[in-house]
Amino acid sequence: MAKYLMGLDNGGTTTKAVIFDLEGNTIAISNKQTELLALGGGRTERDMEQLWEVNCEVIREAVASAGIDAEEILGLSLSGHGKGLYLWGKDNRPAYNGIVSTDTRAYRYPEKWEADGTADRIFAKTCQRILPSQPVSLVRWLMDNEPQVIEKTQWIFGVKDYIRFRLTGQAAAEMTDFSGSNLVNIKEAAYDRELLDAFGLGDIYGKLPPLKYSTEITGHITEESSGKTGLKAGTPVAAGMFDIDASAIAMDITDQDKLCVIAGTWSINEYISKEPVLNKTVMMNSLYCLPGYYLVEECSPTSAANNEWFIGRFMEKEKEQARKEGASIYEAMNRMVEGVSPEEQDILFLPYIFGSNYNPLAKACFIGMESHHSKAQIARAVYEGIVFCHKVHIEKLLKNNPNLRTVRLAGGAANSAVWVQIFADVLDLPIETIDTKELGALGAAMAAGVAAGVYEDLQDAAKKIVKIKDRVEPIQKNVETYRRKYRLYREAEEALDGLWKKFRVSE
């Protein structure tokens, strides 16, 4: 009887269940979107019950599509977006809507903690900047604005921890995720009462679930969740990992000389290190899914979600034409962008729909448009602007690790040949892509495989599973063009930085 592993991936808007064989080949996939509730005042939420039902649905559909018996699935694990907040109530129901990682309602708290010295005092324990979308900021906001929510909360979860809890009935918080929450002392890999007290969060200590490592079995499919998902009761469920770790391990980021770039909802740029970066020039240090390694990260909500926004707002005609032709709107946009050369226009796009890499109040905008510019030229500016914002982050990482010589790229941009080339040309580094589109789910399945005894450890899983699909080299003529355009981009963002606080902010 053949054997399989399942990875369950919950991003900011999309949930996927993917079944892999033990060599990492995709056997079946089901994915569905959950409605994003944009409520104003920087709030982005989702219905937690709807999210649970969607997870059950994609699991059932993936098993049915694979045409296998659920008994053949040796284990399951999860990946999910980091940051955000998913609260489970004492009444055995969600205590609030799920809060997604693009939420900026709590932006005043990092500013306050920076100004009053709290950020400096706790840095030795957390080794990271404080972000508005982290649980630390969101819980503090709820305590001050909707204290009844925290009062009725039993467990504080990340998205994947919430879904795993529904599958197994066992509460746990996975280490890669929570070590990036500013709620964990990452030097000790443990909760820290002094740290929580510094944020005025001492009262939530008992609401924090036990911390577990990625490949630990944290529970088994219950009879109740078996009935809803079709999975066999008793199937082991591993803790899983933050999706940026899952994508990295599924790209064989197991040494310190490769840069991992994920162009998804967030711009994620990272490498692994035996030591954290403590000079405060990078945004985040967290614990990686490989024991003994830190994940050094620069990130912001400035990546491919901006492209989704552009398509949704400005490409309805192209979407309708693609539907008629049975084609993908992404393929249509790629063709548009391919028809424009890098030197053809100097339109700058600042990809700040959900804030920038330095200012949560920043707004997206186009600069330099003239009456003769076409939609295709504007579309190329969108692709370029997103890559320029990645480069801002990557320059900081390269200053701390100049030995990074290859980029492994994942996310929506990795599926576009023209976008991959833009990454290579802007970064002036070779770009490698991996032979699977489902990196988050694959990384989760690798954790499930280790927990089930299929692989010795995650390094062994990566060695046996990961396959390089393509390697793209920079085109020198384009490199020179993009150096000039990138200088314009940096000058534009710096010139506008002081303007954003003058815009009205809805509360």
Image: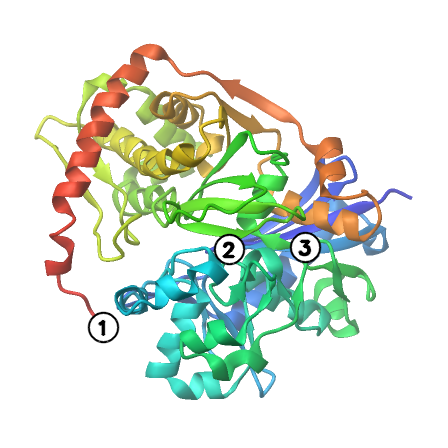
Q: Is residue 83 above or below residue 384?
A: below
Q: Quadrant of residue 340?
A: top left
Under mark 1, the amino acid is Glu
Under mark 2, the amino acid is His
Q: Is residue 312 above or below residue 23?
A: below
Disc with the residue nearer the chain's start (2 vs 3): 2
Tell me the quarter of the image containing the C terminus: bottom left
CA–CA distance in space, label 2 to label 3: 15 Å
Point out the frontmost of discs 2 and 3.
3
Residue 460: x percent and y percent? 76, 37
Instruction: Say which residue label 1 marks.
Output: 507
Identify the residue at image location x=55%, y=50%: 243
Residue 64 showing in the rendered view: no
Identify the residue at image location x=54%, y=72%: 192
Check disc 3: other Cα within 10 Å, few if <14, some if 14-19, many if 20+: many
Identify the residue at image location x=40%, y=74%: 199
Residue 318: x percent and y percent? 32, 36
Q: Quadrant of residue 252?
A: top right
Instruction: Say which residue label 3 marks.
Output: 214
Under mark 3, the amino acid is Ser
State the mark number for residue 81. 2
CA–CA distance in space, label 1 to label 2: 25 Å
Q: Secondary structure at mark 2?
A: loop
Residue at the farthest top position: 477
